[in-house]
Each structure stands twice: as structure tokens, then as C-alpha cells.
Amino acid sequence: MIYLDYSATTPVREEVIDTYARVCREFIGNPNSLHSLGVKSKELIDASSEQIANILGVKPSEIIYTSGASEANNTAIKGVCFKYQNRGKHIITTELEHSSIIAPLNYLTSLGYEVDFVSLDSNGLVDLEDLKNKLREDTVLVTIASVNSEVGVKQDLEKISEIVHSNGRTLFHSDVTQSIGKEKINFSCLDLASLSCQKFYGMKGIGALIKRDNLVIEPLIHGGKSTTIFRSGTPATPLIASFAKALRLAYEAYEDKYQKVVDLKRHLIEKLATLDVTINSNDFCLPHMVNISLHGIKSEVMLHALEEKDVFVSTQTACSVGNYSKAVYAITHNKDLASSSLRISLSYLTTFEELDEFFEIFKNALDKLSFRRDV
């Protein structure tokens, strides 16, 4: 098997599974219980939170554990907008956002909120002048992902933050799901940030919303004591402990891992450039993603042709809605390219031999499908 869909989800590291299993066996008490088993579980959660906070450069009290990035995104967006309705009902975002951003924004428009999409330049970067112009006195929230999940465009969060916070009433949220474990984020420039453990070789079902300490939001889930007043429910001790383990492992030998992915991407791009495809990812993209478009071949057809050879890639982000890539269209303004795009996502676990084998399989499939198209 050649797995090249790491941006959708990553395999769980054995050490993380071991931590999860051990905590399930040894820490059976509800962390909210007052007896010794509950206290033992709470102490483990507190230690895990401390470790996560140290790695990310935030405070333990700023971590809200969620079921994943989708819940974190919904909590951030709705939590801010419902709490600060007196500030206004104007929101700014981009066409590159994940569906768990766009869907709650669409919901809010049904409640009278107004959503503006900031312009992008030819590389997919936020037009900072347009962002300045779109900011209004009643802009309550700006939500822009650190890295787009389909093409890999990497935004300059610090520059965007300066502009957003020039308006003292506007809060800045970023979905940093595709960044964590791959690059380092300066959380001090953000008011809220969403992430998911499954993107950095951890368990599914656990994520977090990082919320600036002095910021109050309206919870999505009410009722019951937890690690925070902003998200009720029994804390998932095994998932939280394994979260900390996965995050620590993700940033071990970080520079070496990153450089390997840079080299892998360069190797793959050199090979793909010899074929009749359009490469949508550019120099402003995180190296972990290579997005390409086929010519006259539907992306789903190619995906299944590769799957028959035990090669796994994506047509677009796994949670997206529709039959074409909104992100590719936002950058290229070409419906054909957006309808025929493939996302090849890399990892430090990927080998050069795998990429060479993938290329030969992909080239043969491309030749066969092109021949059928032309007949």
C-alpha cells in the first residue's frame, strides 16, 4: 500500500496507542469525582494539559478539549458571535476555508449575520489591503485558516492579526489543523485556534480549541462539570493523555522531519512536471501537500484507478461538500481545474521509493485514461 492522504488523517503511532490503552486500564475514575480514583485521573489530565500548553506556547487554562476540529471551529465561531452580538454581526473569512467553517457561517447568515469573503492574490494569499478595507466597526470576527487543507496555501497569520486587531472590537480565529505537528504557530497573535489530534498521528475523536484566557465565549454544550466551563461533558482521560503524547512525538526532531518533506515534495514536483498535469500548489504552500489538476479526466476516475493499485490520495478535503474543489477554484478561477484536482499529501513517513512507485502507477493510469478520453 502507498498511502498519500496524510492531510485527511494520519496513522496513529504505536506509542500513542500504548498510552491510550494504559490510561484506559489504569485511570478508570471520572476526573470530576472526588474519590482517589477521580483525583488520580484529574492529576493526569492536568499534567497532560501542562505538557500540551508548554509545547504550543499557551496556558493550560486556554485549552478547551473538543471531539475534533469541527467542534472547535463551531464552538469558536458560534461562541464568539452569540456572546458578542452587541459588537455587530459582520464576519470576514476566505474562500479557502474548511466546510466546518463555511457551514456555521452559512447558519449564522440565516440569523441575520453578514459574511464577507476577503480577496486572494494569484497565489491564494489573503489580500491584506482588501482585508483592511473590509474591516468595519461592526466586524465581530475574522476567521482564516493557517493552511488551506486542499492546496496547502500558508497564510501570514501575524500580518493578518495586526490588521484585525487594529480594530479593537474584532476577534481573530484560525483553524490551524493542517499546521500543528508540521510547522510552529505563534498563538499569541490569535484569539482562538482550532486543531485536531488525528492530523499529527494521534487518536480520532479528540481536538482542542485554544482560547485566549480573558476571552469569554458562549458554550455550544451546556451542563455538567468538565475541564472548562466552555465545554461540558466528562473529560476523556485516555484521549487527552494520548493527545499530549502524540503532540510531543510530532515535534521531536521537527526540523529533520520538515526538511525531509521539503525534499520529498521537490522530488515529486520534478517528476509530475514531466506529465500533462497542472500543479496548483506553489511556493507559498506547506510542503506536505501537492495539489494537481488533470486535463479532461475526472479526479474521481483517477482516484479509483489508483486505488485499484493500492495507492490512496484525495480528490479534495474529506469533509468537503460538492463535486469540485472550492479551494482550487478560488485560486485558479477555472472550473475544469477545480473539477479534476487531486491532493497528494506527504509525511515524514513517506519514502522516496514510494513516490517513485506512485509516479509510475500514476503515469500509467494517466496514459490509459487519456487514451480512452481521446478515442
Image: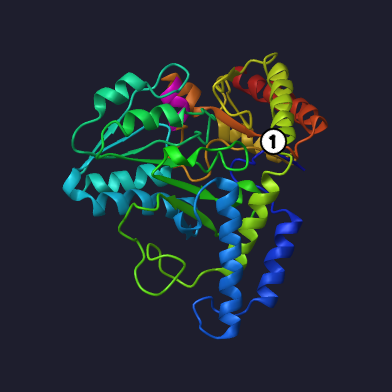
Judging depth in this view, the residue of 137 and 363 nearest the camera is: 137
Rendered view: 141 above or below 276: below
The picture places residue 72, in percent across and down from the top left corner, at: 43, 53
Q: Element under label 1?
A: helix
Rendered view: 129 above or below 345: above
Q: How many marks?
A: 1
Rendered view: 248 above or below 233: above
The region drawn magenta spans: 326-331
Amino acid type at circle 1 is Leu
The picture places residue 123, in percent across and down from the top left corner, at: 48, 19
| Residue 220 in view (yes/no) | yes
Q: Quadrant of residue 327?
A: top left
Whether residue 85 sits left or right of residue 148 in the image: it is: left
Rendered view: 332 above or below 226: above
Judging depth in this view, the residue of 209 and 326 nearest the camera is: 209
Binning the other alpha carbons within 10 Å of mark 1 as few (below 14), some (14 to 19) or many (20 upward) gives many
Q: Residue at x 36, y 42 (%)?
A: 102
- Judge whether residue 327 is colored magenta: yes
The main secondary structure of the magenta stretch is helix
The picture places residue 97, in percent across and down from the top left corner, at: 42, 37
Q: Which residue is mark 1?
A: 306
